[in-house]
Image (tube, rainbow, N blue to C red):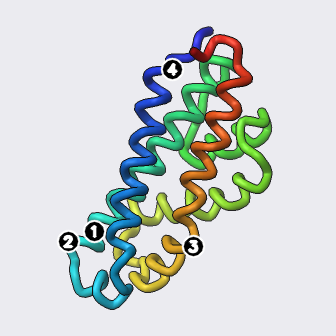
Amino acid sequence: MELDSQRIEKYLDEITNESLIIKSVLEKSDENIVQSQIELRGLKYSIILISEAIANVLQHILAKKYHISINGYTQCFTKALSHNLISEQLYERLKPFSSFRNMLVHQYWRIDDMIFLRNLRVGIVDFQLFIKEMNEKLKKLSDFA
């Protein structure tokens, strides 16, 4: 089956745009961000949007190229790794992120805001690494225009 290049590009653009928003907020100190519930909630929402976009990209490629259906968010990453869509390094970096996304969505009140910000500052580069790996992988797929 053929990949929908416009759909994938839309998701990758969303990751880029949300990453830029996150980076602009992270120019402030953690203490200032924590004092602003609007900015803090905005960061958490951006993380949810990015995680959904990543899962949508992986799920689309797995379904169209490998005829694999996904039974859950975390399974996107394990199936993507087993089909060489993402590197072992990226998988290891995104695996905690996928667990964190589930906690954000389902148990947001348990998240320590300072730990969230510290992890976000370190992990923001993983989103760009994902885009880079996807663009490289998509160039190798013959029907991706």
Q: Which mark is residue 38?
A: 2
Q: CA distance from mark 3 to mark 4?
A: 30 Å
- The percent position of residue 27, horizontal first and vertical second, equals 37, 76
SS category of the residue bearing label 2: helix
SS category of the residue bearing label 1: helix
70 w.r.t. 7: above or below: below
Mark in the foreground, 4 or 1:
4
- The percent position of residue 85, horizontal first and vertical second, equals 72, 36
| Residue type of the residue flagged with mark 1 | Arg
Q: CA distance from mark 2 to mark 4?
A: 34 Å
Q: Which mark is residue 41?
A: 1
Q: Quadrant of residue 33?
A: bottom left
| Residue type of the residue flagged with mark 3 | Val
Callout 1 touching callout 2 (CB < 8 Å): yes
Split into 4 quadrants, where in the image is the C terminus? top right
Mark in the foreground, 2 or 3:
3
Q: CA distance from mark 4 to mark 1?
A: 31 Å
Q: Which mark is residue 5?
A: 4
Mark 4 residue crowding within 10 angstroms, few (<14) / some (14–19) / many (20+) = few
Q: CA distance from mark 1 to mark 3?
A: 19 Å
| Residue type of the residue flagged with mark 4 | Ser
| Residue type of the residue flagged with mark 2 | Ile
Q: Residue at x 54, y 34 (%)?
A: 57
- The percent position of residue 18, horizontal first and vertical second, equals 37, 53
